[in-house]
Every structure is written in structure tokens, then in C-alpha cells.
Amino acid sequence: MVVNIDTFLALLEKEVQDYQVPVVDLIAVQTKDPFKVLVATILSARTKDEVTAKASERLFAEADTIQSLAGLDEQRLQKLIYPVGFYKNKARYLAALPAVLISDFEASVPQTMENLLTLPGVGRKTANLVLAQAFNIPAICVDTHVHRIMNIWGYVETKNPQQTEMALRDKLPEKYWIKVNSLLVAFGQGTCRSVAPHCDRCLLAADCPKIGVKPRKIKKSNNVLRLVSWNVNGLRAVHKKGFMDSLVEMAPDVLGLQEIKAMPEQLPKELQELAGYYSYFYSAERKGYSGVAVYARQEAKRVIKGIGDERFDSEGRVLTLEFDSYYFINCYFPNSKGDLSRLGFKHDFNVMLQAFAEDLATTKSVVICGDFNVAHKEIDLANPKQNEKHAGFTPEERSWMDDFTAAGWIDSFRKKNKEPEQYSWWSYRSRARDRNIGWRIDYHCVDRNSVKRIVDVDILQHIYGSDHCPVVLDFLK
Ligand code: SF4
């Protein structure tokens, strides 16, 4: 299938009208200032637009000219631009930038690719964006979105952004050079996302060849409940990182959250009583620690807090909702800790939780969801050998998981998906998430009699805001 680029880009122009404008474009339009465009572009590399926008605002409040930027040292710059990606490197570039602009370019931003490339922290992508946005000079800025989407469309067949830029310079009509970046960045952030693009609502879907694409899954039938589990690592924190947007995208019927780290009264009003949902909380006694919550579209017939043991219940680890045809048990399993000092505590919890769930399963279906804090098999983590003696993959923890599944509890994800590299948690260190060096420790397990109710499973790796991502079970009503 050969895409008609004129038609595609014309359709996109209408489509992205209501989308958020990429931050560098916005700064270009609002300020018409090449210096600010250059600085914002340097800040924007490997950084979300919201973060770039706030960092630019803080920086420009203190330094909105080349001369005033020269008055800030590297340490102050680091403080102002944190938490943009690679903020230390970027602070170093920005500290060195004024001297070069003043000595080599008469205190102005140069207007050629060749000269821009001599500036600290400026590569082809940045230079192209500055030429296009600051000076309206035909240039194609190829970032990850442009590279990815042009390949999905089959318009180019390239391995990296630089090859894409060269291919587009040969092929793409010049009238599109300046605007193609804004169009595809907005489109790539909104609909044609890098993971699980929204092909189901894309106006190009009929004619797009979707090369190499794995579209998002949508709930197929009204006869299915979407049950989502997410360790949010702080509900207040994730709320500031787009939780409400993620909620719209996930569209859960029941959402189990772990590690909410808050008492209900500490939460913003819209989280205390989530619109469209019944809200249930079970917080730890200790402030800012552990705690679970459930949001459900339907009101629960009964709510059970804890599992009847003060050692665990004081930590707010289990919240169970009873519905007509099933129990939803939302769990935050203990972490056995780096020195394994809580291994025994965790084992006791596991055994009690299993007994609690088995008792409920004598009457109706049971779904246990949550952060189990254990990767069951080698396929469930990126580096099994290195982690054999580490918390979350010790023989003791895996052995309980063996016993648990042998007792008839079904890991719904593995029932449907046997693929490796399907992780739900990544360390914050060493860019582990970018490199997908992760663990699958978040589960939906169902009792053996309910296996036929498992319709579909998914791990929403494209949803950010926590070190875990949400996991989904579509469960027959
Ligand atoms: S149909 Fe899917 S892959 Fe194609 S452009 Fe739309 S969102 Fe992207």
C-alpha cells in the first residue's frame, strides 16, 4: 500500500487542530525569539513537553537573553531546569552557549545548519527545529515521532532519524518541510503513540499500512469487565503526572491501586470521590506508606478491609470488594527487602492471603490483583541469573508462587501470553524502563473455576507516572 502523503498530511492538519501544540512551536509562536527557541529546543530533547514548558518558564524568568544567560553558572542552571532529561549535560551546554554566541556570532543565533552545529548541545535535530521554527527556513526536523510514523506509513524505509531526514529531503515536497515535525509530534503524542497506537480512533486507519504496529486493545464487548491493577507508587504523585488522562485511556470498570501512600483526606477532592466511580480506601496506619484503593463503576455489595491479622492490616495491604458474581481482592504484597529481612513476614502474609482468598472462592469467582512483589519464572524478568538471590526472585518467594499456582490459582497473563519481555516494573536507575530491563511482578490471578472468564490480558507499558505500569484483565461478566 502506497500512502498519499498530500491526503495524509491534509487530514492530519485538521485532526491535530485540537491537540496540544508541541512546546517548542508554542514558544516560537509566542515569543518569535530565536534565542528562546534554541534554548527550549535544547531542553526538550528526551523530555516530556510539560516538563520542558515548566523548565523553560523558570529559566526564562531569570535569563531571557544571551547576556543574562551568561550570568548564570552551571549549578544554578541545573537547579532551574531540573528535572528535564540529562539536565546536568544540558546545564553544561547552556553555561557554555553564551560565550560561543557572543564571540562567533555577534551575540545572535546563527541561521545556517553549519553554524548551528558548532554550538554546544546542538545536533541536526535541534538545528533543523531552530531553522524551521525560529527562522522559517525550510528544514526537516526528524525526531523519534517523524522517523517512526513515516516508517509506519511506509513512506520511507529507514533505520534511524538521520536516514529518515535524508530520505525525506529527497522525497517530501518542500512545502511540508517546516510543518511536518509539528504535525507528527502532535499526532505521535496523541493518536499514533509509540506503544499501542490508537488505530481504533485514527482517521488514517483505513489507508494506513500500519507497518510493524501493535495497536492498543479495546474492550470488545459490553459483556466484559475491564479490571485494572496499578501500583502507583504514591497516588498524589501519580495524580500530578497525568493520572486523570490515564484513567480515561484505561477506562476500567474496576481499578485496584497499590502503594497509594496517603490517607483519603490527604488526597485531592477529585481523587477522594472519583467522578463516575465508587471510591474505597484502605490506608496504612503509618502516614505516607503502603495503602490500597479501589475505584469501581458499580457499588460493591460488601467491602472487606484486611485479612484479619494486625501485622498486615496495619499496613493497609488488602482491600476486597464483593460484587454479584465475583470478589475483587486488591493486594499490595510485602517486599522482602534488600537484605531479605522481611522474607518470613512476606511468607506469612502470602499464606494468610491465600487462605483468605480460598475461603471466598468457595462461594463465587475470585480475582486477586496487585503488586505481588515476586517474578514467578525466569521469563518474568530481564536478568534472572543476576537476581537469583535478590528480593522478588528468591527461591523462597518463587516457591510460594509455585505452591499458589499448584493450588489452582491461575496467572491470567501467562494463560494468554507466553511472550518474554513483558514487564510491569522497572527500577528508576540506569534508564531501566527505556531499555526494558524490567520485572513482571503485577498480576491478576483467578481461581481455577473462573479460568473461562479470562477474555484478554494486557500490560499498559505506555502508561507512565509510576515505576510500575498498569496491568489489565478483561473478565467475562
Ligand atoms: S492507523 Fe494506527 S499506525 Fe496508522 S497512523 Fe493511525 S494510529 Fe498510526
Image (tube, helix red, strand yellow):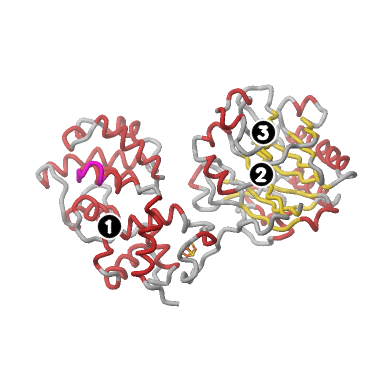
- The CA distance from mark 1 to mark 3 is 50 Å
The residue at which mark 1 appears reads as 124
At a point 72% along the width and 58% down the height, the residue shown is 455
- The CA distance from mark 2 to mark 3 is 15 Å
Amino acid on which the number 1 mark rests in the picture: Arg
The residue at which mark 3 appears reads as 279
Disc 3 C-beta below 8 A from ligand 1: no
Q: Marks 1 and 2: which is nearer the front?
A: 2
| Of pointers 2 and 3, the one earlier in the residue sequence | 2
Q: Are marks 1 and 3 in contact (CB under 8 Å)?
A: no
Magenta includes 166?
no
Q: Which residues are magenta?
A: 28-34
The residue at which mark 2 appears reads as 229
Taking depth in this image into account, of 334 and 457 the one nearest to the observer is 457
Residue neighbourhood size for the residue with mark 1, other residues' Cα within 10 Å, grouped as few (<14), some (14–19), many (≥20): some
Residue neighbourhood size for the residue with mark 3, other residues' Cα within 10 Å, grouped as few (<14), some (14–19), many (≥20): some
